[in-house]
Image (cartoon, helix red, strand yellow):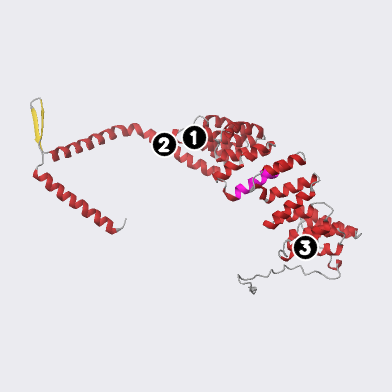
Amino acid sequence: MKLWRWILLLAVVAALAAFGWHWIAQDPGYVLVQLRGWQAETTVVAAAVLLLLAWAVLGSLWYAVRWPFGALTRRHRRLSRQKMGEGLVALAEGRHGDAERDLHRASRLDALRGPALLAAAEAASRRGEHARALTTLDEAGQVVPRAARVLRARVLRREGRPGEAVNLLAADADTASLTPGGWRELALAALASGDTRRARQALEPLQKSGALGARGYNALEAQVLTAALRAAPDAAALNALWSQLPKTQRRVPAAIDAYARQAASYGMVLPAMDEVESALRREWSPLLVDTYGLLGGDDVEARLRRAESWLDAHPNDAALLLTLGRMCARQQLWGKAAQYLERALALSPGSGAWETLGDVYAGQDDAAMAQRCYRNALALARGEPVQPLPQGTRATRLDTRPIAVEERSEHGVPRLPE
């Protein structure tokens, strides 16, 4: 509060006190107390002051009498809070044994019993003591049943029993009474058990709650949709599922990738390519560009021309260069394919580019270079260093430096590079 407000408040209080004293001074009142021949006379103000003093004295005496008896209770409360703090710190530091011990001691205080038992169960689960964690959750369920149920599902999933976790949460899911943590556990447990319907059921409430944040929800959504689309048993089921998905989910790159690959495996190459091309027109995605190059079909030449038209806008995209290299290799355009693949490897080395480059050398009957490329693909996949190609493998070495994309202002005037 600012200084002038304090001054104004004090002035108001002083004015009220002055007027109040003047009003009481005119008629202070009269109080008479008689008891068995004893009597006392005083004013109303003095009587009020005496009552307040008596109340303060009696309160102080009562506190002094109670203090020795409450010393043990206060000590128990202080130690429980201390153990709660130490247990949570130990849990964060990975000292799960110490955390479990301290948290069980903290649970002796009724106010901390629920949170302490939940944290102790989590500590036991992280140690791999799942049976002890479930026993602790039995106790926690008497205090915080909803949170204990969610944590029990997590422990069951970690123990390799995702089906039991789904069954545990199914009743609350059917009545839409799960907490955000419960919906997340239901999605993960359903994915682990192959129940993609339950996993998709959890997406909408999770999105509405916003508990995972945009990045966490997008990752889980992509995981669930990919699993659901890959689990489609035939083309009819795949198309039915794809048509049932909301429009926003049909625009998730991972979902489009899963649909396109699954549709192509069932012989529906044209619908797969249509979805990928439509998505790339809306928003550029290296994942879908890679998918576009892996799809089969007989119209490789037309798709190659379309993909080459994207190169003007994305000259430094390694995924696009790898896709172009794969298409050229499929058309047996060995020199062109090698140019695209060498540039892709210079921008972003990947096992796919090395493998395709090996196919190019194999198509040119250069077994030694093909084997070297295949070995590099395996080494890169294992995280091992690769062996560069000899400098003389091409008569003219390519300029593999990134191409600078021309930037223009809002008026269309080219900007000079910084």
Which is the main secondary structure of the residues drawn in magenta?
A: helix
The residue drawn where x is 61% and y is 71% is: 409
Task: Choose mark 1 or mark 3, whichever is in front.
Answer: 3
- Taking depth in this image into account, of 264 and 374 the one nearest to the observer is 264
Left or right side of 90 for 280: right
Circle 2 Cα neighbour tier, 10 Å, few/some/many (<14 / 14–19 / ≥20): some
Task: Choose mark 1 or mark 2, whichever is in front.
Answer: 1
Query: Where does the C terminus fall, quadrant-wise?
Result: bottom right
User: Percent position (x, y) of residue 234?
Assistant: 77, 39
Q: Quarter of the image holding residue 387? A: bottom right
Label 1: element kind: helix
Precedes in sequence: disc 2 or disc 3:
2
Tag on residue 77?
Answer: 2
The residue drawn where x is 85% and y is 57% is: 330
- Taking depth in this image into account, of 295 and 372 the one nearest to the observer is 295
Mark-to-mark CA distance, 1 and 3: 62 Å
- Taking depth in this image into account, of 147 and 230 the one nearest to the observer is 230
Q: Which residues lie in the magenta part?
A: 215-226
The residue that disc 3 covers is: 308
Q: Given the image, on which type of amino acid does mark 2 rest? A: Arg
The residue drawn where x is 59% and y is 39% is: 183
Mark-to-mark CA distance, 1 and 2: 15 Å
Precedes in sequence: disc 1 or disc 2:
2
